[in-house]
Amino acid sequence: MMFKKIFLLSLVGFLSIQLHAQQAWTIYNNINSPLPENSVRAIAFASNGVKWVGTDYGLASFDGTNWNVYKTTNSGIPDNSIRSLAIDAQDNVWVGTFTSGLVKFDGTTWTTYSTLNSSIPDDFVRCLEFDTLGNLWVGTIGGLGYFDGINWDIYNSSNSILISNNIGSLHVDSSDNSVIIGTINGGMVFKDGNSWSHFTIWNSNLPDNTILGIDKDTTDVIWLSTPAAGLSGYIGGIAFITFNTVSSAIASNSLTCISIADDQSIWAGCNDSGLIKREGTNFINYNTINSGLPDNYVQVVKVDDQGIVWVGTQLGGLVRFDESLLSSVSAISENTIFNLYPVPAGEKLYISTQEKLMLVEVFDMTGKRVLFQTAFTNSDKMEIETASFKSGNYLLKVVFADGSSGSRKFVVKN
């Protein structure tokens, strides 16, 4: 009997370690980490795996363990308010600021390009993208810049097809170095060498003249995040296919950013409903109610080469999301050898079974264990307090006195 108890406790411990060695959702904020500010505006990945994070009050680098924070008080960075980031082939970090232009950091020296010492169109830099030649496209609120490290080419409404100088997003096609320009209230523009193409709501079925994020999948569809019309894909000619709350199951039309993973799933952030994933023809929504996401206002999303989704929120800090760990919890097989009531649960959940219970665990859908309770009476019924649980989906796991176990999902509405 003693051996059986030891084996059972070891088994339960092993399962817990397997499920919780790494949570699916990891939150970094200015309380639990050196992150300088909880409003995360920009994320970029260096070739050595270091994540660079731009916030409203400082720049940070994170290697998975160690943080470095750069502010005007401890470095040569001229502005604490970061709006965009890009990293070149030499792992130099290029920083777009709110009021002080473009900054290059080579690990030692900070070099600033502003309207005071260069031809940059404006000191508010919204977006940055490198081409395959190492030249930098710079999107500002006063026009588009192209910088080779020495010389600037400037494009605006007075010398190009652009009808808005406020550049909201950029994407460079690595196959031909053509650049796709998303503007604020001026539609989308293609620049391929000396050739320009312009798409607006007036000359195509582009659904919104403001484009806040651009990425391209392997089938050459260009995907756009728009703040008023949802997710749109450019499929050629003047044709766009759009997914909004009327035409699809997408959770919001107010999209702020976009990133396409290596598996071609599309990740988009929005300003009211959290994080959206498009996988095939399906949409999945992660928000503060049904997941570990700390804030429904997502300002930036980037997927790294390991498939980890990095999310910058307005108030909740930086989020690391490993969906594969979430799936491992969600995919635990259910059995029906016990019953749960009421469904959905409110302040209490009751377990009823013909077998003798030994212990109960409850996990939220991030994989975090939120309850561990032993059935001291060795009874076939148990009452669980769920009044403190947030509304959402949970997984209940039971271990019986004979060493067998089972699991079922349930919903709490409080």
Image (cartoon, rainbow, N blue to C red):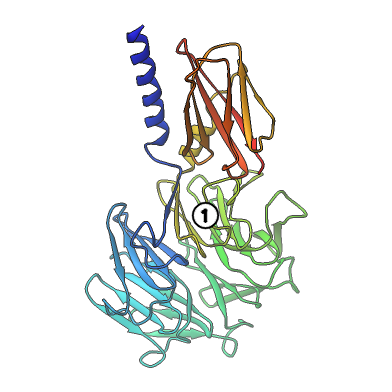
Which residue is tagged 1?
Answer: 294
Compare residues 275 and 20 and report the one nearer the observer: 20
Residue count near mark 1 (Cα–Cα under 10 Å), binned few <14, some 14–19, many ≥20: many
Compare residues 17 and 302 and report the one nearer the observer: 17
Residue type, label 1: Pro
Residue most toward the right?
246
Where residue 361 appears, as percent x and y from the top left, is: 49, 29
Which residue is depicted at the point 71% across and 48% down? 249
Q: In this picture, is 139 found above or below 327?
A: below
Compare residues 153 and 388 and report the one nearer the observer: 388
Which type of secondary structure does the marked residue at label 1 adopt? Answer: loop
Residue most toward the left?
108
Which residue is depicted at the point 66% across and 77% down? 185
Residue most toward the front?
377
Compare residues 333 and 409 and report the one nearer the observer: 409
Q: In this picture, is 25 found above or below 335?
A: below
Where residue 174 appears, as percent x and y from the top left, is: 45, 61
Where residue 362 appears, as percent x and y from the top left, is: 52, 32
**Residue 118 falls in which quadrant of the image?**
bottom left
Quarter holding the C terminus is top right
Which residue is depicted at the point 61% across and 69% down? 211
Which residue is depicted at the point 54% across and 47% down? 264
Q: Is residue 179 visible?
A: no
